[in-house]
Amino acid sequence: MKTPHMQQEIEALLPFYVNGTLDAEEAAQVEVALATSTEMQEAVHEMRMLQQAWTTRTPPAPSPHLREALLHAVEPQPSRLLAWAWHACLLIIVAVLVWAAVSPGIVLRWTVDPTAADTYAAFVVYRQMDEGAPEQMALLPAGDRTTFVFVDSFVRPDREYVYRVVAVDAQGRALATLSAHERGRSALFYQVLTLAVALVVGLALARLMTPLLRVSPRLSSVRL
C-alpha cells in the first residue's frame, strides 16, 4: 500500500521519467504506480504532449535589423575627449599643410634687368616691424631668374612692416636695395580665407576618418 508520502515522491519523479533520466529502479517504481493511477497516466500524457510541442516548435525568426541594431548598440564609440583630441590634431595638421601650400601673407615681387642679372648673386630680404630691429627673413639665390617672389606668411594684422631687399654680389657686397612699406591687415582676408578652407577640409576628413577609431566588436562574428 502506498502512503501519501510515497505518492508525492513518485509524482516528483514523473518529469524525469518522461525525459528518460531515471535509473532502472526508479523507472520501475514509476511504471508500477502508473499501472494503478489514472491521474498519473494523465499527468504523464500531458507532459509528453508538452515535450513534443516544445521540441517540434518553430523558433521565431529575429528581425532583419536586429543584428545590425545590436551590434550598433554594443559597438564601442570613441570617447568625447578622444574625438575632440582627434579632430583638433587633424585640424591643426590640415591647417599647417594648407597654410604652407597657399602661403597667405604679404607678397613682395621684383624683377631685375636681364642684362644685369649676372651681376647679382643673391637677394637678402630683411623685415622691420614697428620701429624694431630689422631681421633677416630669407636669402634667395639669383640664378638665371629675372623675377623673384617672397611671401611673408607670419604677419599680424595690427602691425606695420618695412621690408628691404638687398641685392649682393658673390663677395657679399650690397649692390642695390629695394624698400617696401606694408600693413599686416592687407593679408588678413587671404589668411582668414585660408583658415576657413582648412577648417572645412579638416572637418570633412575628420568625419570620413572617425570610423577608423572604432574597434570591431566581438559580436560581429555572431550570427543571429
Image (cartoon, rainbow, N blue to C red):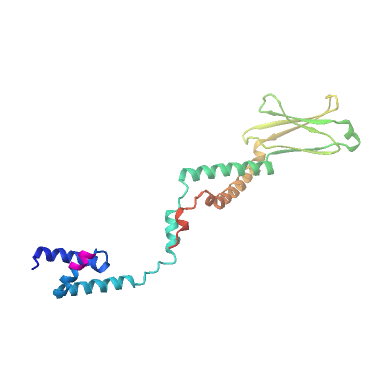
Position of 128 relative to 70 (above/below)? above
Residue 166 falls in image quadrant: top right
Give residue 131's position: percent from left, percent from top.
Answer: 67, 25
Q: Is residue 193 above or below residue 65?
A: above
Using residue 207 as the reference point, say whether residue 116 is left or right of it.
right
Q: Position of residue 165 (x, y in %)?
A: 78, 31
Q: Residue at the location (44% across, 56% down)?
A: 219
In which quarter of the view is residue 10 placed? bottom left
Residue 99 horizontal/vertical position (percent): 65, 42
Q: Nearer the viewer, residue 104 or 224?
A: 224
On the rendered structure, is 144 left or right of 10?
right
Residue 145 covered by magenta stretch:
no
- The main secondary structure of the magenta stretch is helix
**Does residue 207 appear to the left or right of 108 in the view shown?**
left
- What span is in magenta? 24-29
Q: Is residue 106 above or below residue 201?
A: above
| Residue drawn where x is 47% and y is 47% of the image | 78
Depth order, front residue of 69/89: 69
| Residue 80, x across and y down, in percent | 46, 45
Q: Which quadrant is the C terminus positioned in?
A: bottom left
Quadrant in which the N terminus appears: bottom left
* Vertical relation: 175 (above or below) 46: above
| Image quadrant where residue 118 sits | top right
Q: Residue at x 67, y 37 (%)?
A: 153
State the count of labels: 0
